[in-house]
Amino acid sequence: MRSPTKNQRGSAILSALIVAVIISAVAAKYVQTSYNDFRFNHETMMGFKALNHAESGVEYAINAYRTDDWSGWTQESNGNYSRTYYPLDRQKFRVVIDPNSNPITVFSEGLVDNPMTPEISRQIIVQLERRGLFANGLTARETIIFNGNRIAIDSYRSSLGSYDIYINRGDNGTVASVSIEDDIIAVNNGDIWGYVATGGGEPDIGPNGSILGEDSPVGTNIDPSRLSYDFYADFPPVDTPDISSAYTSYSGNVIGSPSNSSVYNLSNFDIRSRDTITVYGDVKIVVQDETDIKGELIIAPGSTLELYLKDDMNIGGTGIVNQTSDPASLQIYAVDSGVGEIKLHGSGTLFGVVYAPDSLVSLKGGGSVGAAYGAIVGQNIRLNGNYEFHYDEDVGDIGDSGVKISLWKELVSSDERIDYTSLRSSGFSDRWQ
């Protein structure tokens, strides 16, 4: 018969073995769990790195497009460009861009290789829309101030005919400033049938001011959905026309000739009170000194006028009479930072666009209610008196101020992901065109 001491010792050993087995199992499970957590966290971190590389590829592609510098890129037979970058050891991103499509399409893939895991890849597809100089009604680097008892902003489309409050009126009269300062846009008591956008600052809206649109709630004056604080715009320089063979003067009261194109390089451009000058054909005028219109400048039907200013401009009197009623047919550009002010104070109705990102642009109503149709870009913009401004949405494509992102999508599922090698040779599918 075994002694109780031996039985107790055997039980203790057995219990110790069981405990050891349990501890070993728990420890193994803990180690396995810890390793899985470590691997998961590591893969997650590598995934973030791959995504960051893919985003860098998009930025490189946008910069190449905007600067039209394809140095180091490979032009494929289908017209696309491709390139692979190696920012760090065992890490890379590769990019394909179709700069000729509309919208412009960019594919970028970031890849991170690591001995612990398979190669990690993140893919992005981006689409870019070309942005014109006049994508908004009123755009400023700094301030936009409404001074007056009745200032109204809205939009229309000249391609549909004349502005009509019932049949040709839109709610896209956007007023925008890139500034981050508060009160940089002073709506005061103006009425905006559209949007207000800033780079971060709050607009100053008076007790009788309004920012509304077709879908705004009834009974409110300020629709929060029509306010944004992340506005950004480029203000690229505008090239002056070639004046090597330009006319240096004009005779009589006519500039240009019907159905012909002509370029003028004038030391100054003055139209005295009661004088009338008529523009025929497609005319471009570069003015070296001040432009002062106290009389009447007429743009004949079927004609266009582009004014390139290197000094201040003052329009009074009847002003510029655009008989085409098409804002695109009158384009005014400040091509020198020395253009301090452009005054549009004529008593007539203005149909045109103004691009002067380094200048003060001021508009003032005539005897009753002044009106302008088109778009304006300035460093500072002032609307004074009783004034109506109707943004022509059809001028939004004039000029080139870069691109805006219309689609940014990470390709996650196997159905979405793209093979880089195939993409280089075959190009983007209809799905991304």
Image (cartoon, rainbow, N blue to C red):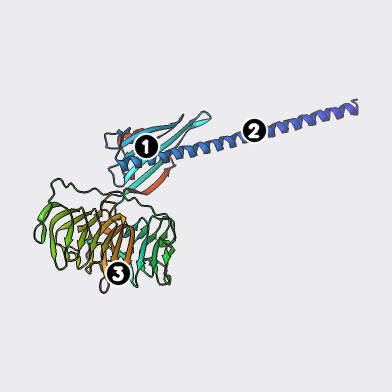
Type of residue at label 3? Tyr
- Relative to 41, is 361 above or below? below
**Pointer 2 local density, CA inside 10 Å: few below 14, some 14–19, many at least 20:** few
Outermost residue toward the bottom in this view: 368
Above or below — where is 309 with respect to 317? above
Instruction: Judge depth for marks 2 and 1 and give the one in front.
Output: 1
Q: Is residue 129 left or right of residue 309?
A: right
Q: Which residue is mark 2?
A: 31
Q: Give the residue drawn at x 56%, y 38%.
A: 41
Dot 3 or dot 1: first in sequence order is: 1
* Residue on which the image places disc 3: 387
Answer left or right for 59 relative to 315. Answer: right
Q: CA distance from mark 2 to mark 1?
A: 40 Å
- Three-letter code for the amino acid on which mark 1 is drawn: Val
User: Residue 34 in the image: x percent, y percent?
Assistant: 62, 35
Whether residue 370 is visible, yes or no, is: yes
Contact between marks 3 and 1 (CB within 8 A): the answer is no
Q: Count the numbered circles shown.
A: 3
In space, the residues marked 3 and 2 are separated at their CA atoms by 75 Å
